[in-house]
Image (cartoon, rainbow, N blue to C red):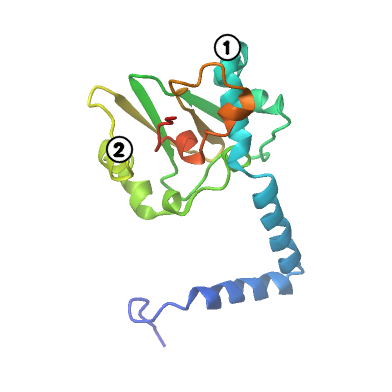
């Protein structure tokens, strides 16, 4: 009997998750243990503070800033920060008074998660993914970031092997601050490019 997908109600998320778990368990995957391990990594290691440390160092060390912009993965490795094997390149995009970079993944929700943390829910939303590439200024304004019309906005779409991180501008009034204090003001949103930092 043919079932028209348009007339068949979708199963609940819980039912779909349960079905996937059942299939994985039958294949010998220890689902609960794997989920617990990934949760621990997300909470303890895949955090925005990693990228914040890179940003803070780049603000106080011009040599490191150049290395970060030339080869993001190598610069991150100086801090003991790695990326999955399939992430072959970390491109760091520097914001300035006249250029504002913002990142997205139009296909799904890819980010340099080991560096800037797991993506927020809105980053994964179809509205953001589809509109940011066509209506960047409008979307950023809707998210609370009003940019001067003279500022050029550049949108970068993640690929299968390339990940991006925005290097936000250092806020005025932070001269003389320690690296730790600087790192504390850097947010995941600023490294995605939907926020400018202020103090």
Q: Using a 10 Å C-alpha cutoff, classify the residue at mark 2 as few (fewer than 14 neighbours), some (14 to 19) or many (20 or more).
A: some
139 is higher (above) or lower (below) than 55: below
Q: Nearer the viewer, residue 164 or 23?
A: 164
Quadrant where the N terminus sits is: bottom left
In the structure shown, which secondary structural element does the residue marked by tag 1 occupy? helix
Q: Quick one: SS at disc 2?
A: helix
Which label's residue is closer to the chain start, 1 or 2?
Answer: 1
Q: In which quarter of the image is residue 172?
A: top left
Residue 91: image x %, image y %? 53, 27
Residue 65: x and y, percent? 57, 17
Name above or below for residue 67 compared with residue 143.
Answer: above
Can residue 55 be seen here? The reply is yes
Q: Which mark is residue 19?
A: none
Q: As drawn, which residue projects farthest toward the top?
A: 63
On the image, the x and y values in percent for residue 144 come to: 32, 42
Q: Residue 136 has which mark? A: 2
Query: Which residue is found at the position 47% from the left and 78% from the top?
Result: 11
Q: Read off the residue under disc 1.
A: 62
Task: Using residue 110 as the reference point, say whether residue 122 is left or right of it.
Answer: left
């Amino acid at each position: 009997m043919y079932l028209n997908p348009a007339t068949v109600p979708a199963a609940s998320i819980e039912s779909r998750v349960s079905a996937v778990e059942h299939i994985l368990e039958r294949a010998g995957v220890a689902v609960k243990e794997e989920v617990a391990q990934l949760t621990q990594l997300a909470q303890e290691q895949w955090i925005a503070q990693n990228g914040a440390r890179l940003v803070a160092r780049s603000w106080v060390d011009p040599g490191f800033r150049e290395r970060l912009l030339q080869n993001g993965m190598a610069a991150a490795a100086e801090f003991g920060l790695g990326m999955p094997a399939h992430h072959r390149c970390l491109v760091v995009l520097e914001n300035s008074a006249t250029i504002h970079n913002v990142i997205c993944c139009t296909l799904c929700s890819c980010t340099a998660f080991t560096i800037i943390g797991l993506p927020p829910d809105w980053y994964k939303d179809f509205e953001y993914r589809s509109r940011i590439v066509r209506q960047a200024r409008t979307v950023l304004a809707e998210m609370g970031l009003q940019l001067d019309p003279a500022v050029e906005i550049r949108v970068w779409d993640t690929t299968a092997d390339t990940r991006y991180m925005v290097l936000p501008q250092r806020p005025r009034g932070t001269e003389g601050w320690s690296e730790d204090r600087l790192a504390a003001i850097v947010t995941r949103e600023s490294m995605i490019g939907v926020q400018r930092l202020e103090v």
